Amino acid sequence: VRSFSIIESTLREGEQFANAFFDTETKIRIAKALDDFGVEYIELTSPAASEQSRADCEAICKLGLKAKILTHVRCHMDDARIAVETGVDGLDVVIGTSSFLREFSHGKDMDYIIRQATEVITFIKSKGLEVRFSSEDSFRSDLVDLLNLYKTVDKLGVNRVGIADTVGCADPRQVYELVRTLRSVVSCDIECHFHNDTGCAIANAYAALEAGATHIDTSVLGIGERNGITPLGGLIARMYTADKDGIKAKYRLEALRDVENLVADAVQIQVPFNNYITGYCAFTHKAGIHAKAILNNPSTYEILRPEDFGMTRYVSIGHRLTGWNAVKNRVQQLDLSLSDDDVKAVTAQIKSLADIKPLGIEEVDTLLRKFHDRVHAIGT
Ligand code: HCA
Ligand code: CU
């Protein structure tokens, strides 16, 4: 996969999450945390949405972050005029192109869309700002219409065209096909935005990059409209697996957990137990066979190195699936001297107790210490 940029949309798409209400101070903290992590772009809610949205957009532009600041506007001169005055580096412009949106949302035909796009793009460019033009609901739009539209805006000199799976209906193969086709039609960059209604948002982002996309939209923990979009952490996990050194060089990976905790607090949710990288069991190994192998060489059952993300590995031993190698490792950590036969015997005890109820690590440690004392008392 070639190089790519993240367009981090927690402060735009994420604001469309049911629980989200970000006051100015929270937006600034999130923007700074994202910048610290190293995302290339931060996308903000349209300044045309409300007076406070406009003021917040200006405040974030004044922070002097490394990340470029974008705002997201409808393909409309009224919105574009307000947005170019906020101090943003660029505008992400969007219009609905599927027959659903054309019929039931804005009611405009393709000729109208092309005229409107031309006016808005020309205006933004005249202000010297970066501009992306995207269709909404791209996967349910007519392909010929779409390609015509993108060809036109490419000639107008947009920096990027965008594809959005607004309803989360696309699968990775469809994404690959569409991006590949688009790649052969335009010369500008390609941005992609994937909703996660059917669980494909990360895989679709990856397929898009393989097909030649250059920019991926994310939000922290995937928050957004309905069940959200490609999560930042999940995309990072995927891309790290494809190009570990590249990702480690581009982003400050230990900062991922901080930004996730910050956003989870702000929208009053817990980080899910099975979250990519930072979920509480993401690096917990349980079955005896896994534990043994992990202790010999973590790569046997870990594709992500926890230490690269400031996380730690945990080997769980107080349960009925445990094995004596894992118990032996704990015995060594506690600096107890037990023969392998002793360790096997105490493992059998742990298993039989854990058949009734799993043991916490303190209970296991107490058991090991008592066992050790008994063995050595008999010896003397
Ligand atoms: C929406 C708009 C959008 C826009 C995506 C984009 C979508 O809220 O419906 O501009 O890249 O999913 O289509 O988020
Ligand atoms: Cu969206």
Image: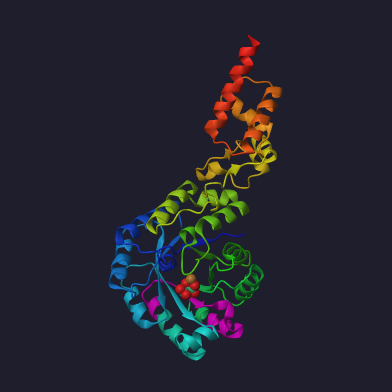
Image quadrant in which the C terminus is located: top right
Residue 42 in view in this figure: yes
Image quadrant in which the N terminus is located: bottom right
- Location of residue 38 with respect to 157 vertically, above or below: above
As drawn, which residue projects farthest toward the top? 380
The residue shown at (44%, 64%) is 9
Residue 132 in view in this figure: no
User: Where, by quadrant of the figure, is residue 200 drawn?
Assistant: bottom right
The residue shown at (43%, 65%) is 14
- Location of residue 197 with respect to 126 vertically, above or below: above
Say whether residue 88 is left or right of residue 236. Answer: left
Q: Nearer the viewer, residue 357 or 265?
A: 357
Q: Magenta part of the protein: which range?
A: 123-152
User: Where, by quadrant of the figure, is residue 123 drawn?
Assistant: bottom left
Residue 310 x/y as whole percent: 50, 43
Residue 29 x/y as whole percent: 35, 55
Q: Is-magenta flag for residue 372? A: no
